[in-house]
């Protein structure tokens, strides 16, 4: 799916990840355990920045559904806000470093 997404989205910066498998490698990579997620919404709510905790899908009836457990204001305001629910501080700070390098107009709030 990741390689298909790259072909479909081209230069649009979209990340596709299989959140159902994160618990298998997360602790080894980041040093903290990650229990299996109960749902897609549970996975989205654990993203390192609340700003990125957005999910969209199309229902069988063809309607768009948005899941944004922390709202969308920060995304529209280009503000990164940490989410200490799962990711450790260094994960958030590494993402902030990369994102603000790529998009200098972002404002990053500090880890709590």
Image: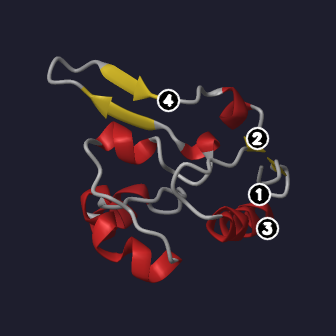
Q: Is residue 93 left or right of residue 52?
A: right
| Residue at 63% in and 41% down | 51
- Percent coordinates x, y for residue 90 in the rendering: 68, 71
Local secondary structure at mark 3: helix
Q: Is residue 66 left or right of residue 84?
A: left
Label 3 sits on residue: 101
**Which mark is on residue 78?**
2
Mark 3 and mark 1: Cα distance apart in space: 6 Å
Of badges 4 and 1, nearer the viewer stands 4
| Residue at 66% in and 65% down | 95
Local secondary structure at mark 1: loop
**In the rendered image of this protein, does residue 18 appear above or below residue 107?**
below
Mark 2 and mark 3: Cα distance apart in space: 14 Å
**Is there a contact, CB below 8 Å, between mark 1 and mark 2?**
yes
| Residue at 36% in and 41% down | 42
- Percent coordinates x, y for residue 63 in the rendering: 28, 18
Label 4 sits on residue: 68
Of badges 4 and 2, nearer the viewer stands 4
- Which tag, 2 or 3, sits closer to the chain's start? 2
User: Which of the two residues, 36 or 96, is positioned nearer the viewer here?
Assistant: 36
Local secondary structure at mark 2: loop
Mark 4 and mark 3: Cα distance apart in space: 25 Å
- Percent coordinates x, y for residue 66 in the rendering: 42, 26
- Label 2 Cα neighbours within 10 Å, binned few <14 / some 14-19 / many ≥20: some
- Label 3 Cα neighbours within 10 Å, binned few <14 / some 14-19 / many ≥20: few
| Residue at 38% in and 62% down | 34
Label 1 sits on residue: 103
- Which tag, 4 or 2, sits closer to the chain's start? 4
**In the rendered image of this protein, does residue 76 appear above or below residue 65?**
below
């Amino acid at each position: 799916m990741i390689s298909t997404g790259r072909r479909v989205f081209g230069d649009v910066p979209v990340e596709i990840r299989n959140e159902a498998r994160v618990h298998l490698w997360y602790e080894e990579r980041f040093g903290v355990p990650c229990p299996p997620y109960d749902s897609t919404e549970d996975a989205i709510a654990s993203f390192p920045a609340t700003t990125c905790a957005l999910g969209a899908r199309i229902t069988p009836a063809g309607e768009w559904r948005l899941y944004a457990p922390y709202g969308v204001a920060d995304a529209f305001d280009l503000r990164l806000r940490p989410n200490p629910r799962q990711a450790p501080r260094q994960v958030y700070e590494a993402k902030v470093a990369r994102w603000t390098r790529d998009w200098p107009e972002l404002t990053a709030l500090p880890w709590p």
